[in-house]
Image (cartoon, rainbow, N blue to C red):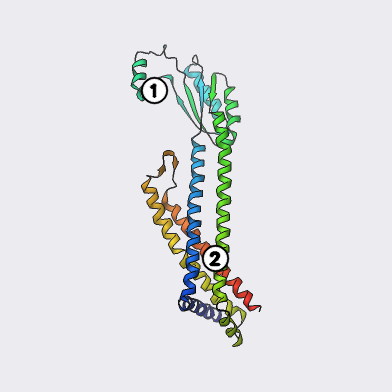
């Protein structure tokens, strides 16, 4: 029971200390709040950028054009051959008639031009539209499909896709590095701010030692106080994440300029980010307090 009483007393002393040293606590909380806001915005931005690249990758389509003389039975055989591929996520067939109807619906000029076509006069080619599982293997997949008997040609915008893949890799690496650097800078700022707070109270630590308090009983209230400061400092960033991101999502109707650039749905995304922000604040607060107190206990 003694450890529990000691822990409960440490929590009580930690909260008392926060209010007793309000000006110093406010400085620490302000630093934590500002830095965690930056981290929160960076996390929201980087995860959405990664989501954009994922959606664009998923939207890449291989269009397989079928020879005009291929009949319906042969179409089934070609489909079965394509579907055997390990990298095929989905496959959709469109006949010459369906393609013509879509083109007619898209333009009044095309509608007038194609209105009197019969099936024999239709010069269009039936197609298979294919989504792949791994865009990195799209060139290999397209090459295999192109060799199937009855396939006229394959198109997936090879040059553009290669450029996209290179850009995606750079973007993903940059966002990861940026977030890591921001978190490291945040940890450095918060730890040093809390160290200054503890430094101003080194006399208090010395008195505690003089009256016979053990190292553990001295450390625990300060460590818990650091955790409390981190938790309080994370409240405003959490509110910005929850209400700010939700308002941003609603304002842009869930997408930026194009359906391909869709924002991540707020729930449960905002709660996961909020949990990460609170966790960072609490852990860094505890770490800063622990390091500072340990330093003064060695003196």
Q: Which residue is mark 1?
A: 103
Residue appearing at x 55%, y 77% in the figure: 200
- Quick one: 155 or 133, which is closer to the camera? 155
Please determine whether, in this image, residue 121 is positioned above or below residue 251. above
Mark 1 vs 2, N-terminal side: 1
Residue 137, percent across and down? 59, 34
Number of dots carrying numbers: 2
Q: Do the residues bearing badges 1 and 2 touch, measured as CB atoms within 8 Å?
A: no
Categorize mark 2 by other alpha carbons within 10 Å: few (<14), some (14-19), many (20+): many
Element type where label 2 sits in the image? helix
Quadrant of the rendered image containing residue 150: top right
Residue at image mark 2: 190
**x 43%, y 19%: residue:** 96
Rendering quarter of residue 169: top right
Q: 28 above or below 101? A: below
> How far apart are labels 1 and 2 at the CA level?
60 Å
Residue 142 got which mark?
none
> Residue at 50% across / 61% down in the picture?
35
Q: Position of residue 63 (x, y in %)?
A: 50, 26
């Amino acid at each position: 029971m003694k450890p529990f009483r000691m822990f409960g007393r440490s929590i009580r002393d930690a909260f008392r200390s926060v209010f007793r040293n309000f000006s110093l606590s406010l400085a620490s909380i302000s630093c934590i709040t500002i830095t965690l806001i930056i981290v929160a915005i960076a996390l929201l931005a980087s995860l959405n950028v990664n989501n954009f690249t994922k959606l664009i990758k998923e939207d890449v389509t291989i269009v397989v054009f079928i020879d005009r003389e291929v009949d319906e039975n042969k179409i089934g055989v070609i489909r079965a051959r394509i579907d055997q591929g390990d990298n095929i996520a989905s496959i959709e067939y469109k006949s010459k008639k369906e393609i013509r109807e879509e083109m007619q619906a898209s333009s009044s000029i095309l509608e007038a031009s194609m209105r009197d076509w019969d099936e024999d006069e239709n010069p269009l080619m039936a197609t298979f539209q294919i989504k792949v599982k791994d865009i990195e293997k799209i060139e290999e997949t397209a090459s295999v499909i192109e060799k199937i008997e009855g396939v006229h040609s394959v198109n997936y915008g090879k040059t553009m896709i290669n450029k996209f893949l290179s850009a995606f890799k750079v973007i993903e690496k940059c966002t990861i590095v940026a977030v890591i650097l921001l978190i490291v800078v945040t940890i450095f700022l918060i730890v040093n701010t809390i160290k200054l707070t503890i430094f101003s109270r080194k006399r208090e630590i010395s008195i505690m030692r003089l009256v016979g308090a053990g190292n553990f009983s001295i450390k625990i209230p300060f460590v818990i106080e650091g955790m409390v400061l981190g938790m309080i400092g994370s409240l405003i960033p959490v509110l910005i994440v929850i209400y700010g991101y939700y308002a941003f999502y609603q304002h842009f109707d869930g997408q930026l300029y194009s359906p391909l650039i869709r924002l991540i749905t707020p729930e449960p995304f905002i709660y996961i980010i909020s949990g990460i922000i609170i966790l960072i604040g609490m852990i860094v607060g505890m770490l800063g307090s622990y390091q500072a107190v340990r330093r003064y206990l060695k003196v």
